[in-house]
Amino acid sequence: MFDGVIAWLALSPALVGVSLSTYSAAAAQTKSSLLLYRMAGKMGGVAAVLTGIFWIVNWVLLTRRGQTIGKIMVGTRVVRVDGTRAPFLNVVALRTWPLLVLSYIPGVNTTGAPLLAFIDALFIFRSDRRCLHDVIAGTKVIRLEPKSPRLGGSRLGG
């Protein structure tokens, strides 16, 4: 959820100066995933760069820590199903790229990708609470134990 908010903030420069009605009319005429960026001109370029930076930062964090910015904020981590550290192939390429690529394919991005994203989210209600992207990647999300406050190198209260 936090990652989605940050992604929308990165996209926000493209939203400046493009009315919803203008965008909707243009979107009806084309199947381009990059329409908003193109319509926003220079601000669309800024948004594209910010969005790219957001994805790269998250991919580096996922590879090194098993966490995105949002997962750091809520105290969760992505690991392999067996609990070991998930490498780049699992945590980035298999877990995030398939849905991302589908969202940029003209035609699929308007119908198939939203449906697949919905199905992906519904998988959370399975007994193992793994979404479709976790099943594909062989990963799961775990909650981290909160760190105890420390004072002078020892735990408080003990």
Image (cartoon, grey):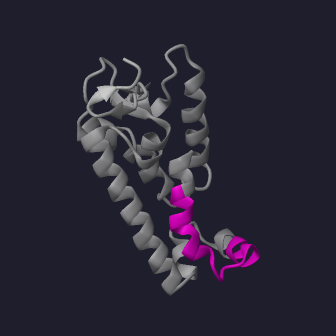
Which residue corresponds to the image point at 50% horizontal and 70% vertical from the top-left? Answer: 34
Residue 6 location (% of width, % of height): 52, 57
User: Is residue 33 visible to the viewer in this orientation of the structure?
Assistant: no
Rendered view: 22 above or below 149:
below
Most extreme residue toward the top is 127
Magenta: main secondary structure equals helix
Residue 71 location (% of width, % of height): 45, 40
Rendered view: 19 above or below 93:
below
- Using residue 12 as the reference point, say whether residue 105 is left or right of it: left
Which residue corresponds to the image point at 56% horizontal and 18% vertical from the top-left? Answer: 126
Which residue corresponds to the image point at 55% horizontal and 76% vertical from the top-left? Answer: 13
Of 126 and 103, nearer the camera is 126
User: Is residue 43 visible to the viewer in this orientation of the structure?
Assistant: yes
Which residue corresponds to the image point at 25% horizontal and 39% vertical from the top-left? Answer: 89
Residue 75 found in image quarter: top left
Most extreme residue toward the bottom is 42
- Using residue 50 as the reference point, say whether residue 87 is left or right of it: left
Which quadrant of the figure contains the C terminus?
top left
Rendered view: 1 above or below 37:
above
Of 8 and 113, nearer the camera is 8
Q: Magenta span has 11? A: yes
Residue 48 location (% of width, % of height): 44, 71
Residue 9 found in image quarter: bottom right
Total labels: the figure holds: 0
Which quadrant of the figure contains the N terminus?
top right
Residue 127 location (% of width, % of height): 54, 13
- Using residue 83 as the reference point, say whether residue 23 is left or right of it: right
Q: Magenta span has 88? A: no
Stretch in magenta: 6-25
